Amino acid sequence: VGFLILIIIIILINIGSEGLEGSYSAREIFENTDSYSALLYGSFAGGLFAAGFYLIQPTQDGSLVAPSPAVLLAMVDPRPRAEGAEGPKPLLTLSQSADAFVNGMKNLLPAITVLVLAFTIKDTVNQCATDRLFTETFTENGSASTFPTIVFVISAILSFCTGTSWGTIGIMFPLVSVAAWELADGDVDLFTVSLSQILSGAIFGDHSSLISDTTILSSIGAGCKIGNHVWTQFPYAVWGALFAILLGTLPAGGGANAGVMLGVGGVILCIVTVLVAAPVVSPSGRYDVFTTLYMRLTPSSALNKLQEKTIAHASGVKADRESGTVNPMDGDKVQSVDISM
């Protein structure tokens, strides 16, 4: 990761310096650079670096060994070894690294497709002058106090439908910027809050969408179904969005200090979360409010079974503590609970 960041910064500076004459500042360099090319070349360089790292990382008998000079020489030694003897070999050969690179691109293809389509929508919106229609509609009929909330909701819906926060940001900024400036009427704080809701709404929709690139990659990495991944995090995303609106966008649109509301909202969010949440291993086996509501609407034998196992586990831990057979510091480890369904 460090190499990737370093090489991207070097490429950004190199591209940004081209065409500039005389002395120039860092700001001028980054204004003149091409981030797309830097990310492209940096990612490719990062892939080559990873392939080289795997090539010189030796393994023997299924375990990693230190890449000492003797081990590295043994890896490239062409002489035949004794029958049954296995010498050190690379963690991944160049051929295996290339296959992994191609397979990784295959897994990323759906996310890349969604992103390309989102940027296509962005260009279409700009060409159709939709920003002018948006500005006229909200400056004539909209209210400055509710505008940040409206921007948040629209960004969230758009991000949820397209599955990309980057694409939503690219679409919404040209639409919102002029309207926000007109409605703010010189109020820089209101203008800033309105634009910031593009980012907030885009992130919310991206976390909640079934076709989000991050959702797809997270599901692949966790080895679970996309639907299961979405439904396990959706209540938490809605929970955060609710507090963002009630203690963020609405008060800020009404003139409240954004910094004060951020602090107050954070404290209230923590207090309410403690009240509605439940311990991972509760002696009563109770679930949090969201799961309890779900079980009332949709009875689940699997969740009932897990609840019974949690109660049994908590009772066993309590008995072991009283008898002194376990360390009290180790008694509540989650991994000791059998949650097989």
Image (tube, helix red, strand yellow):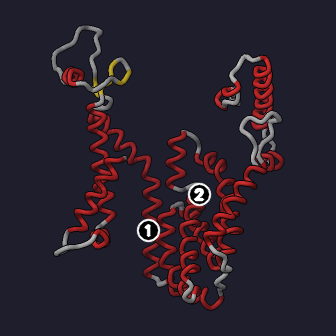
Which one is earlier in the sequence, the residue at label 1 or at label 2? 1
Position of 339 with respect to 12 (left or right) is: right
Residue placed most toward the observer, 48 or 102:
48
Helix, strand or loop at mark 1 = helix
Q: Which residue is mark 2?
A: 209
- Above or below 189: residue 315: above
| The C terminus, quarter of image | top right
Which residue is depicted at the point 83% across and 35% down? 284
Q: CA distance from mark 1 to mark 2?
A: 17 Å
In the shown orientation, is residue 121 left or right of residue 155? left
Q: Is residue 316 above or below residue 122?
A: above
Identify the residue at image location x=24%, y=21%.
71
- Residue type, mark 2 in image: Ser
Which disc number belongs to residue 165?
none
Q: Dot 2 lies on which element?
A: loop
Q: Is residue 290 left or right of residue 138?
A: right
Give the residue type that dot 1 points to.
Answer: Phe
* Observer-nearest of 220 and 234: 234
Q: Is residue 204 above or below residue 306?
A: below
Q: Which residue is mark 1?
A: 119
Q: Residues within 10 Å of mark 1 (few under 14, many from 20)?
A: some
Specify few, some or many for label 2: CA neighbours under 10 Å numbering under 14, 14-19, or 20 or more: many
Residue 104 found in image quarter: top left
Give the camera-side residue of 216 and 242: 242
Residue at image point 26% right, 38% down: 52
Q: Residue at x 59, y 62 (%)?
A: 205
**Is residue 189 at least partly visible in the picture?**
yes
The answer to whether mark 1 and mark 2 are in CB contact below 8 A is: no
Q: Residue 134: tell me if it is visible.
A: no
In the image, 334 versus 99, the foreground residue is 334
* Residue with the most extreme bottom position: 140
- Residue 78 position, x and y percent, is 16, 20
